[in-house]
Structures are given as C-alpha cells and as structure tokens.
Amino acid sequence: MNQSKPHTTRNPWAWIPTLYFGQGMPYVVVMTVAVIMYKRFGLSNTDIALYTSWLYLPWVIKPFWSPFVDILKTKRWWIVTMQLIIGAGLAAVAFTLPTPFYLQASLGFFWLLAFSSATHDIAADGFYMLALDDSQQSFFVGIRSTFYRLAMITGQGLLIILAGFLENSRGDIPSAWKTTFLGLAILFLILFLYHNYILPRPLADQGKTARTAKDIANEFGKTFISFFTKKGVGLAIAFMLIYRLAEAMLVKLASPFLLDIREVGGLGLSTQEVGFVYGTVGIIALSLGGIIGGVVASQKGLKYWLWPMALSITLPNAAYLLLSFFQPENLVWINAAVAIEQFGYGFGFTAYMLFLIYFSDGEHKTAHYSICTGFMALGMMIPGMISGWLQEMLGYNHFFVFIMIATIPTLLLVPFLKIDSEFGKRAKKKTK
C-alpha cells in the first residue's frame, strides 16, 4: 500500500479476473445473501425488504463522492484498502450473528460493506482504464464481465448452498452463517494480500493532482447542473426510475417466496435448493440473457430492440405468478420458471444500460453516466423498501398479481422515448 514504490507493470491476466471477482462478491452479499440470511433468521418480509433496500443508498449517492476518489490517494490504494475493510466487515458480521443484538450490529456492518463496495467500484473501474491501453480495455471487457458474473454465481449459488449444508449438518442457523461469513472474510484477506502485491503501479495513477477538492466540487457542480438541463431529462429520469419498477419489488421477495413454507404461499425450498435454483440456474440464465441482448442490440440498435426488451423485462414476471398459483413441488418446473424470468430480465436490462449510455453522451459523459447509475440504484431502492410490506398485506399470490400490474407504467413510458435509430450499433457496451 506504499505509494512511493516505482512504476510497475503486470500481465492483465494476473489481476483483472481476481479484481472483478472481488468487485462482485460484496455487492451480491449485501443485496442478495443478506436477504436469504435474514429470512433464515426469521425476520418478516417487511423488515427484510425495508432494511436491505436501504443498503442501495451508497450506490445512489456514489456520484457525489466519486470525484474525490480521483484526487485522494491512488486508485490502487483505494482498491486494496477497501478490500481490507470489506474483509474486516465480513468478519465483524460473522461474530455478531450469534449475539442477541445481531440485527442492529449486522446491519451496521452491512452498511460499511455497502459503502466500501461502492467505493471499490469507483476505484476498480478507474484503475482498469489507467492500467490498460485502449486495445487491452476492449479485449478484457468480456473477461471482467465474466468474472463479475462468476462472483454472482459464487455468492448467490455456492455460498448459499454451503450455508444450507452447514445448517443441516449442525442444526444451528447462526453458527452456519457465522462460518460462512468467516470464510468470506478470509477470502477477502487473501484478495487484499494478493492485490497489494500483484496490482501494477501505472504512471497515470498519481492520486493527488494540482486540482484541489474545492476545484473538483465546483467542476462537479457544473456537470451536475448540465445534467439536469439536458433536453428530455424529465422523461429520461422517469425511465431510469420506472423501467425496473416491477423487478425492483420482485427481486426482494423472490428468495423469501422460494424459502417460505407452502402453508403461507411459498414453495418451501431448503436453503441449499434456493442456492441452486435462484443463485446458480437463475444467474446463468440472467447472464445468457444479457449476453444475447448485447449481441442483438449491436446488430440493429437500441431503437429496434427497445420494445422487445421492455416486454422481456416485464412479461416473464408472470412466471412467479404461476408458481404462486400452482406451487409445484417438482424442481424442474421451479428451475424453468426462475430461468425464464431471469433470462427475460437479463435480455431486457440491456436496453436500460444502453439508454443510460445514450442519455449520458456529450461533453460530460463520464460524470453524467455516474449520475444515471445513481438514479438506477434509486429506482431499485424505493420500490424495494415497500415490497415486503405489500407482500405481507396481500399474500404471495396477490403480490405477484400486483407485480404484473406494476409492469404497466414501464410499457406506457416506452413509446415516448426518442432514440437515434443508429444508436447501439456503434455504442460500446458498458459493464460493471
């Protein structure tokens, strides 16, 4: 972590896969693993959705502190420091789980993980651009995306399966999850040590510059104003907040629905089964949908694919409605339904990301894209906060009926979007 060391270079294969695997893990832990863990601890769906949706806040406000990561220390320093803090935070979660005050303490440490993860995102993506030339950036964009998805499969799939196995073998839920989080903490300690050694020290990653924090704040103020004076900004913000309205509520209750007993409308799956169904099969389908969406959009552009993608991110939600009606016991049917919904989400989400790139285009496109991602997180946070309360008030079956009704605003908004017919054919795909 000493910044005085001389410039060094490394083979990108030595650090890009591990860097983006490390970027994905804390995000999936905070957003998905926490939901399943709290469900196994017996929290109500109202509390789970409300508390875990608040954890989106660091990603909502990330644009406000991202400029300062550019001038305080180096991006390399931020990466390894955040990984150390994430490891410490995961260990702290583990040790609080067997205590009577586990909820308050674990939520506090999940907040630390969320802020550290969001800061790690800023530093890692900036470091990627500083440490690689243009051709390397293009070559490794697919590699970084692949390892980010592998982190999602590991977090939502293998990690949940491990926790379920430990639950069954020990008969002690807090102990099982404590061990699971201690394993994660050790993983991040290893990543911290490895990246502190292996990450290159590019000359461009100088940290402090001649610009002061005040200069950065003034510059951000100007770009912030320019964002809100762009033509069509009101419609664009509405799209950012509404396009995933139904999915924002569904995603918070998907795992609780799979876990809840059949008598209350759930499917009664075990923790291990949820790790396989939602965290493995579902994530693979999500990834395939995203890949295919990117390929077809690059051929005919966003304008051509906007309607098919909007239908894809909304109509497959009916898979959960059907699951709640029939409550199948056969895992094949459950896997198929989850895979269809997740594939549709991955395919339809392509239009959302392309629109963010499209609207951000211009003089301040990097800063404007960062602001767009803040609205993207806000669009998940607010609906997610009320989703648990709605579900407990309506029951699972009627909640999924409401989810289908919530897809209507998305479809009503799409016809009003005006997009260059050529856009998407030439736009570079942005990934986390």
Image (tube, rainbow, N blue to C red):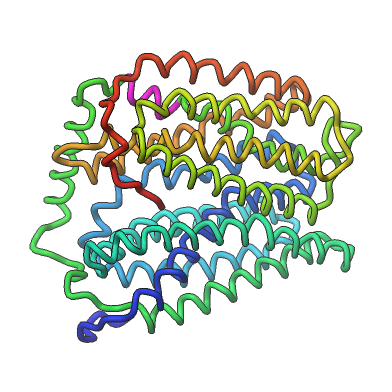
Residue 140 vs residue 250, the one in the foreground: 140
- Please give left or right for residue 136 compared with residue 29 in the image: left
Residue drawn 22% across and 75% down? 202
Q: How many marks?
A: 0
Q: Position of residue 249 (x, y in %)?
A: 60, 31
Q: In this view, does 91 lie above or below 366?
A: below
Residue drawn 20% across and 61% down? 71
Q: In this view, does 186 lie above or below 157?
A: below
Q: Is residue 405 above or below residue 392?
A: above
In the rendered structure, does residue 238 fall within the stretch colored magenta?
yes
Residue 305 vs residue 344, the one in the foreground: 305
Residue drawn 69% across and 62% down? 158
Q: Position of residue 406 (x, y in %)?
A: 58, 19
* Magenta segment: 235-241
Q: Where is residue 35 in the image (x, y as percent from the top left)?
A: 67, 47
Residue 390 vs residue 423, the one in the foreground: 423
In the rendered structure, does residue 33 fall within the stretch colored magenta?
no
Q: Where is residue 56 in the image (x, y as percent from the top left)?
A: 49, 43
Quadrant of the frame with the N terminus? bottom left
- Please give left or right for residue 196 compared with residue 96 in the image: left
- Please give left or right for residue 327 compared with residue 104 in the image: right
Rendering quarter of residue 364: top left
The extreme front residue here reads 299
Q: Is the magenta stretch mostly helix, strand or loop?
A: helix
Residue drawn 82% across and 64% down? 165
